[in-house]
Amino acid sequence: GSVALSQVAFKDWAQGGESALAWTLNFDGKSERTGDRTTWTTSYKTAFGQTRQGDRGFRKTDDKIDLETVLTYKRGAYINPFVSATLKTQFASGITYDANDVGTTVSRFFDPAYLTQSAGAGYQPIAQVKTRLGAALRETVTRRFTNFSDDPTTAGIEDFKVEGGFESVTNIDWNLASNIIFKGKLEAFLPIGSSQNDPIIRTDTTLVMKVNQYISANINVQILRDVLSSPDTQIKQALSVGLNYSVF
């Protein structure tokens, strides 16, 4: 877990400026149960942050719920069958602002939400790298913001979409030094038999640099390519320095 806070305040400052306050909370976890024949791994990634500048109210800067569970049946040293399930959504409403500072809500909790189930084979060439490939089902759940799930080729408006295809996931968890950790994840989903056959690609990489036991700097970069939600490649980058604590 980590928390980062930055603040600046002005009063009668002749050179000008605007007061600001920003904070971010992160929690990343992983639990693993290993038996003679199976390994069950569950990971949790959550984040939430806000900023306030001047007289404007708090605005969201980070918001993520990313859950994944993988059950692997151990047959060999490198290649093993698996089944997995994932959930991706957010905590709070997402708002965009126009040139006149008028906000428009574009997403909410579980609106959209993405669920994926897959089964296939996993490969672990070295201890720090795991990759898997399998057949998958992907569900997109919406309520109000159906632009994430609607099929533009049909007359009706769909608030729930199911796609079949193939999913590839690669995880990297590497201790580059005693105080530097690199974590990366590359996900690709290729829908089959859908009106939208462009692959959905998502990367999430984090570099953690520990100053000491409790203070660390984190650099996170997320890239998303999903033409249904946006025709452009979406990029989010965050740099934070704050308190870090390992529960286990």
Image: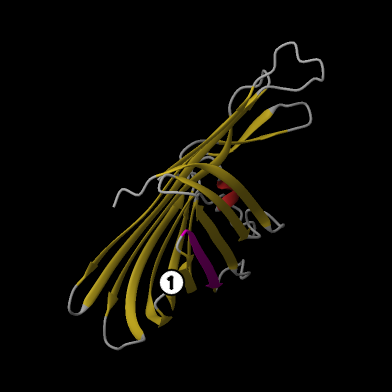
Using the image as rendered, state which of residue 170 and residue 110 is in the foreground. Answer: 170
Q: How is the image coloured?
A: secondary structure
Q: Position of residue 117 (x, y in %)?
A: 38, 66
Left or right: where 176 falls relative to 230: left
- The picture quadrant where one finds residue 85 is bottom left
Residue at 48% x, 72% y is 170
Residue position for label 1: 136
- The picture quadrant where one finds residue 224 is bottom right
Q: Against 41, is 159 above or below?
A: above
In this view, which residue lies farthest toward the bottom?
76
Residue density around tag 1, few if under 14, some if 14–19, many if 20 or more, within 10 Å: many
Disc 1 marks which amino acid? Answer: Ala
Residue at 27% x, 68% y is 40
Q: Position of residue 143 (x, y in %)?
A: 49, 42
Q: Report if residue 109 is visible in the image.
A: no
In this view, which residue lies farthest toward the top?
12
Residue at 53% x, 40% y is 144
**Start and end of the magenta stretch?**
179-191
Residue at 33% x, 81% y is 81
In this rendering, the count of numbered labels is: 1
